[in-house]
Image (tube, helix red, strand yellow):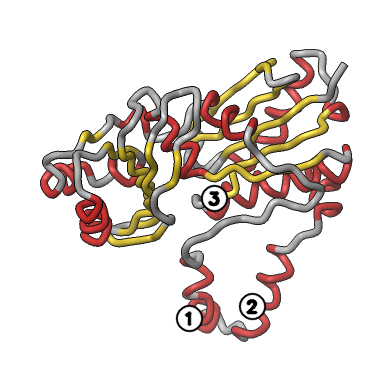
């Protein structure tokens, strides 16, 4: 019997897990838990595997969304993947979040689709794709960028046509996009997250290795950008704080495994 493939995503507020064997879904779960991913992920894995009478030791592939997205969510999933890979010998692969999100519109073949996700107030991540139906993955037509709302609209308009727009960046700023993109099809908020099926489709096309999956960040973390100012107010040396932050955020996979499992 072949091994198992584990898929994990926590790039935005939704925590998604799926386990496959030979490309077929054995189980999948999702939790809308914007601030509870850390406390949910490990127990959810244990419970899911126990319920299906499966062993975590049988995992031989781990696919995880590596960005762009929430710093906390990406680090949670990637450190868990690294820990599991160390303990099981599994291969790993990264899944691009924008690609998975654009696949939500696969039922609209031949369309220019813009995946637009929330980065922070007034700023979005965005990337354009053309859809080819649900038997093929969307094809990127532009690189992913972090832009303010006006810059995002200008970029979409430069490509012309009647585009499709979806994602959390749209939902949080729907009135703005509706005003400035009257010809666009703005998909509803239930398209703000990739489906499990889209994650499975991206996993089938993934490139596997025994290297740790690296996160893809488009902008610095707010706390890191303002670290010197924040710690100086508390009487802490900025260089010492940077060294401490680097040590804490580069926790080895072996240490992570000991803490999580």
Is the residue under label 3 in contact with that under label 2 (CB below 8 Å)? no
Label drawn at residue 241: 2
Q: Position of residue 130 (x, y in %)?
A: 37, 39
Q: SS for tag 1?
A: helix
Quick one: 18 or 154, which is closer to the camera? 154
Above or below — where is 72 with respect to 241? above
Residue 11 sits above or below residue 26 on the image: below
Measured in 3D between alpha carbons, the distance from the residue under mark 2 to the one under mark 1, in whole angstroms, is: 11 Å
Q: Secondary structure at mark 2?
A: helix
How many numbered discs sit on the rendered protein?
Answer: 3
Eye-nearest disc, 2 or 3: 3
Q: Secondary structure at mark 3?
A: strand
Q: Tell which circle, 3 or 1, labels the residue nearer the N-terminal end.
A: 3
The x and y percentages for residue 44 are 68, 28
Answer left or right for 72 relative to 176.
right
The residue depicted at 74 percent of the width and 42 percent of the height is 208
At 81% across and 58% down in the image, what residue appears?
A: 252
Q: CA distance from mark 2 to mark 3?
A: 26 Å
Q: In this orientation, which residue lies closer to the viewer: 90 or 28?
A: 90
Crowding at label 1, few (<14), some or many (≥20) Cα neighbours within 10 Å? Answer: few
Crowding around mark 3 (Cα neighbors within 10 Å: few <14, some 14 to 19, many 20+) is: many
Q: Which residue is mark 1?
A: 229
First reached walking from the N terminus: tag 2 or tag 1: 1
The disc at residue 169 is none
The answer to which of 34 and 220 lies nearer the viewer is 220
Q: Quadrant of the N terminus?
A: top right
Residue 6 lies, in percent from the top left, at: 71, 30
Name the quadrant containing residue 132: top left
Q: Name the residue beneath numbered marker 3.
A: 67
The 10 Å Cα crowd at callout 2, few under 14, some 14 to 19, many 20 or more, is: some
Residue at (38%, 60%) from the top-left corner? 146
> First in sequence: mark 2 or mark 3?
3
């Amino acid at each position: 019997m072949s091994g198992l493939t584990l898929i994990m995503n926590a790039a935005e507020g939704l925590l998604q897990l799926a386990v496959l064997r030979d490309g077929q879904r054995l189980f999948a779960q999702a939790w809308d838990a914007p601030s509870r991913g850390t406390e949910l992920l490990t127990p959810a894995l244990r419970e899911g595997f126990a319920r299906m009478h499966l062993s975590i030791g049988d995992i031989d592939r781990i696919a995880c969304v590596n960005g762009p997205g929430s710093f906390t969510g990406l680090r949670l999933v990637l450190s868990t993947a690294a820990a599991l890979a160390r303990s099981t010998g599994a291969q790993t692969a990264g899944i691009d979040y924008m690609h998975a999100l654009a696949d939500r519109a696969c039922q609209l073949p031949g369309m220019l689709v813009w995946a637009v996700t929330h980065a922070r107030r007034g700023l979005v991540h965005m990337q354009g794709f053309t859809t080819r139906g649900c038997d093929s993955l969307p094809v990127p037509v532009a690189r992913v960028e972090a832009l303010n709302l006006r810059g995002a609209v200008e970029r979409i308009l430069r490509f012309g046509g009647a585009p499709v727009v979806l994602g959390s960046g749209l939902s949080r700023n729907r009135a703005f996009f509706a005003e400035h993109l009257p010809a666009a099809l703005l998909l509803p908020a239930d398209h703000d997250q990739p489906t499990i099926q889209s994650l499975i489709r991206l996993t089938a096309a993934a490139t596997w290795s025994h290297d740790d999956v690296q996160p893809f960040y488009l902008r610095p973390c707010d706390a890191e950008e303002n670290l010197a100012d924040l710690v100086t107010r508390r009487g802490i040396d900025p260089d010492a704080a940077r060294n401490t932050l680097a040590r804490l955020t580069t926790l080895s996979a072996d240490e992570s495994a000991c803490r999580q499992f």
